[in-house]
Amino acid sequence: MRIVSGIQPTGNLHLGNYLGAIRNWVAMQDQVSAQGGECLYFLADLHAISMPHTPADLGANTREMVAALVACGIDPDRSILFNQAQVPQHAELQWLLNGTARMGWLNRMTQWKDKAGKNREGASVALFTYPVLQAADVLLYQATHVPVGEDQKQHLELARDIAQKFNNDFCGEEVPLFTLPAPFIPPEAARIMSLRDGSAKMSKSDPSDMSRINMTDTADTIMQKVKKAKTDPEPLPSDKDGLEGRPEAKNLVAIYAVMAGTTVEAVLGTFGGEGFGKFKPALGELLVEKLAPINARFLELREDRAALDAILRQGAEKARALAIPTLEKTYEALGLVRN
């Protein structure tokens, strides 16, 4: 089993990032390595330039994301952790696969429609061909499985379509060049909502810092944010159905359940009938306890640029060693002279 997954390097990492994605990466690492497989995790900095960006921020955010991943439990000795820009084979394979991908396929991509909006003529070519680079990201390493959520199923299907068409067009009766990756459905990721609006996802783009728990927040700040989180005047219900129509209460209970490694029902069994005056301090203390070691490690790593660069460099060396054979076979299959 070889799993490949990427994440865009964004700044201001928060609780939603950790519970929504990073925690599952750690679980996959532990599960797959125990079975003798391997995980490749990359910072998708080439994808990031498909949208307007600030170069200095991109570099800083890439290193910050590495610090966060390692602090959360990604082990560079058990997983291959790198950024795309140091493995040029990603971009090379994307170009080679552009001859196989079809305009109609890309036009149907939901994320292209969403991100380009009404100004498609003004969107970058990189945004349009983004899914081809995603296909290259996984096909380059002969990935057997790719973690997918609802918003990525369409992109994995495209990667499989590109791989299948390339194999049919250029491999003839020979052994297919590209492995068709299967979806890996990770445990349901926690959907963490804003502390100020239970109907909106926790996000770094929210102008209010009180809406999120940042990975850099101190214990005092975490407690303050939880105590000031928006709630309603009613006590917590005794069963899950009682949370319907109460988005803020539902969000806080869900956060407690995930952080405690228990169920919403169990949390309500303990706090049902209690007001938020009792529940919020308990939630704050739980968050401080669970996040403190991650926070300390993250802050330590974030300041050690040399160590972060070394992690990326070593990971890229391992990734290139796996990528080069597939890329060379792709050139050969296309009849491109490389002597």
Image (tube, rainbow, N blue to C red):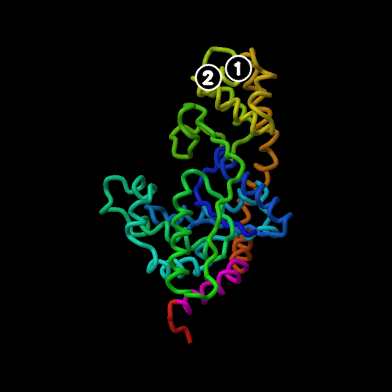
Q: Secondary structure at mark 2?
A: loop
Characterize the local packing of mark 1: few (<14), some (14-19) or many (20 or more) Cα atoms within 10 angstroms. Answer: many
Residue 269: % across, % down? 68, 19
- Confirm or deny contact between disc 1 and disc 2 (CB under 8 A): yes
Residue drawn at point x = 48 percent, y = 39 percent: 204
The residue depicted at 59 percent of the width and 37 percent of the height is: 217
Q: Depth check: 288 or 37 in front?
A: 37
Relative vertical location of residue 164 with respect to residue 112 in this rendering, above or below: below
- Give the residue type that dot 2 points to: Thr
In terms of depth relative to the viewer, which is nearer, 98 or 17? 98
Q: How many marks?
A: 2
203 versus 196 height, above or below:
below
In terms of secondary structure, where does tag 1 sit?
helix
The quarter of the picture where the N terminus appears is bottom right
In the displayed structure, 239 sits above or below 330; it is: above
Residue drawn at 66 percent across, 38 percent down? 291
Give the residue number, with chain letter if any, for mark 2: 231
Q: Position of residue 281 (x, y in %)?
A: 65, 22
Most common SS among magenta residues = helix
Q: Which residue is mark 1?
A: 276
**Disc 1 or 2, which lies upstream in sequence?**
2
Residue 169 falls within the magenta-colored stretch: no
Between marks 1 and 2, how big is the CA–CA gap? 8 Å
- The residues colored magenta run 318-333
The answer to which quarter of the image holds residue 310 is bottom right
Under mark 1, the amino acid is: Phe
Q: Quadrant of residue 335?
A: bottom left
Q: Is residue 332 magenta?
A: yes
Q: Position of residue 45 (x, y in %)?
A: 48, 57
| Left or right: 49 in relation to 296 | left
Q: Position of residue 309 (x, y in %)?
A: 60, 61
Extreme residue toward the bottom, this view = 339
